[in-house]
Image: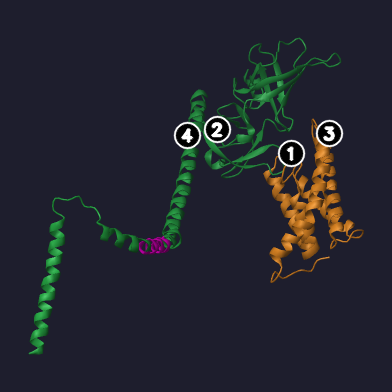
Amino acid sequence: MLGGGAYGPDLLTILIVYLFLYYGRTPAVAFALGQGIIVDVFSVGFKGLFAFLYMIVCAGILLGCRFFNLRDPKGQIILITLAVLLKRSFFFGAVYFFSIDPFSPSSLLWASVISALFSGLIAPAVFFIFEQAFEGPLGNRNGT
Amino acid sequence: MLKGILGFRKFWIFLLIIGLVLFLLSSNAGRKSSWNPFEQALVEITAPIQKIITRAVNFVGGIWNDYFYLVNVREENRLLKEAIDSLRMQNLRYKEIVAAQERLQALLKVRQAIELPVLAAQVVGRDPTGWFKSVIIDRGRSDGVKVDMPVVNASGVVGRIVSVSLNYSKVLLIIDQNSSVDCLVERSRDRGMVKGRSSEICKMEYVVKSSDVIKGDSIITSSLGGVYPKGLPVGRVSSLNVLPDKLFKEIQVRPAVDFSKLEEVVIVLKEIISTSEQTAGK
């Protein structure tokens, strides 16, 4: 979902966590909300669904920072995996409760688990690439 | 006086040499040109030296040809490769143009077949979620597009317009789980409702157990929903199940349209009449 299909990594969640880590809460939340609104506009899903989902992701990250060190790759892997799983759980919950005729095959649940693990595992590499690309005069690095 | 004698002597030596040369020349007449023993001896002495010099000259020439001169060949090779790449790109473009022309011709046939005004549109975006099924097309309110107008292509029914802006519209595809299309089995005229499952296969619901439906039957629109004109292809029955504890048959329909390759569509510019207005009209 949103990059790579059902099994692919959730790049937007990885990006939100990166912004959280290096630029702070406000830019990360603003980005998440903006992305969610844009996705809702272009999607035929429920209005506000993805804005809500990405706010859930932000809340999950805020809570997760208390238990995991975002600067440590292990912490990044765990936190992003959990954030993606949280997002997918809320998504399927919303689809199930608000659809007239909900349809959620078990294969999609497995796809969510694989996507979450995939996202978590590639996150340190993505962070490293972003650090190399954006280090230097790119100002505000007031993260967690 | 001495100078005179020496000069005279030189003259005679010169004459002697000329004479010898003329003698040699005259000795060629009427003979096969073959080396005489003196010439053979001369050749045997000088030929190896000539051989060494020739090899040395060839060696130097080879270095020139194989390395320095090849610079030009390398440059020529590079230019030829660039020309090939350019021609390859042109070829791909022409193939794309031919493919687009075939698609547009098929779309034109759809326009001609539907007895309503239609408008062609291009798909410019897809649903970003991957779960919901919709596309964005490049026609909007300024082109006369309205919500609930049906969208089709050369293969069959694509979906309906659900949102409109000035120049763009969002189309809910029939494979989306929020989509329902009132349909008929073309052969037996049995009614049902084709619903999307957010996957490649749709399901046809509310088909009574007594209906005559078999695998491979063509499913068409019934026009009873008020959205789609009658007779447009929706898909084909791909599987059929009759369960004893269910009221209706479980039918799966493979859509006629290949949604993974959706590029051009046609919007049917029909006025949407609500069900109540239809009933009142009758």
Crowding near the residue tagged with mark 4, few <14, some 14–19, many ≥20 C-alpha atoms within 10 Å? few
Mark 4 / mark 1, whichever is N-terminal: 4
Rendered image quadrant of residue B39: bottom left
Q: Would residue B282 be found to the left or right of residue A70 on screen?
A: left
Looking at the image, is mark 1 or mark 2 nearer the viewer? 1
Looking at the image, is mark 4 or mark 2 nearer the viewer? 4
Determine the secondary structure under disc 3. helix
Q: Residue at x 9, y 85 (%)?
A: B5
* Label of residue B14 in the image: none
**Same-chain status of marks 1 and 2:** yes
**Vertical order, B29 against A6 (above or below):** below
Q: Residue furthest bottom?
A: B1
Mark 4 / mark 2, whichever is N-terminal: 4
**Same-chain status of marks 4 and 1:** yes
Chain B is which colour?
A: green
Question: CB of mark 1 within 8 Å of CB of mark 3?
Answer: no
Q: Residue at x 67, y 38 (%)?
A: B134
Give the residue number, with chain letter if any, for mark 1: B131
Chain A is which colour?
A: orange
Numbered range of the magenta stretch: B49-61
The answer for how far apart the CA atoms under marks 1 and 3 are is: 14 Å
* Image mark count: 4
**Vertical order, B277 against B260 (above or below):** above
Give the residue number, with chain letter if any, for mark 3: A106
Q: Amino acid at mark 4?
A: Gln
The answer for how far apart the CA atoms under marks 4 and 1 are is: 32 Å
Magenta segment: does it hold A17? Answer: no
